[in-house]
Image: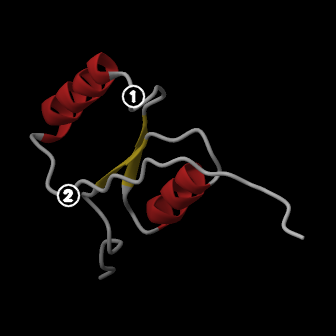
Amino acid sequence: MSQPPPLAGICVVDYSHFLAGPYVGRCLAALGAEPLVFRGSVADAAHVKETVGELVKQWGGIDVLVNNAAFGYAAEIG
């Protein structure tokens, strides 16, 4: 009898536009999580409220929330 994947029943929200979000989502899906993709800006409060409302409707609530919103800058040194 096989065991379910370690993250079965877990929902992961990808709210990013960059490589890290989709890559992490795919990695977690390979472990059994269900990735949900929401496109928009976390600076848009109305869109964030709509997204949270959809998550609560589909999943019954949010157990863990990781906020990784930030600005990144690249500069040549030297």
Q: Nearer the viewer, residue 10 or 4?
A: 10
Label 1's element?
Answer: loop
Residue 11's place in the image compared with 78, above or below, is: above
> From the viewer's perspective, is the residue at label 2 or at label 1 nearer?
1
Label 2's element?
Answer: loop
Can you give x and y, in whole percent of width and height, for residue 28 in the image? 45, 63
Residue for badge 1: 43
Which tag, 2 or 1, sits closer to the chain's start?
A: 1
Can you give x and y, in whole percent of width and height, for residue 8 in the image? 30, 63
Q: Marks 2 and 1, how far apart in space?
A: 20 Å
The residue sitting at 67% across, 51% down in the picture is 73
Residue type at mark 2: give it.
Val
Residue type at mark 1: give it.
Ala
Residue for badge 2: 64
The residue sitting at 84% across, 67% down in the picture is 77
Dividing the picture into quadrants, the one containing residue 36 is top left
Report the quarter where the N terminus lies.
Answer: bottom left
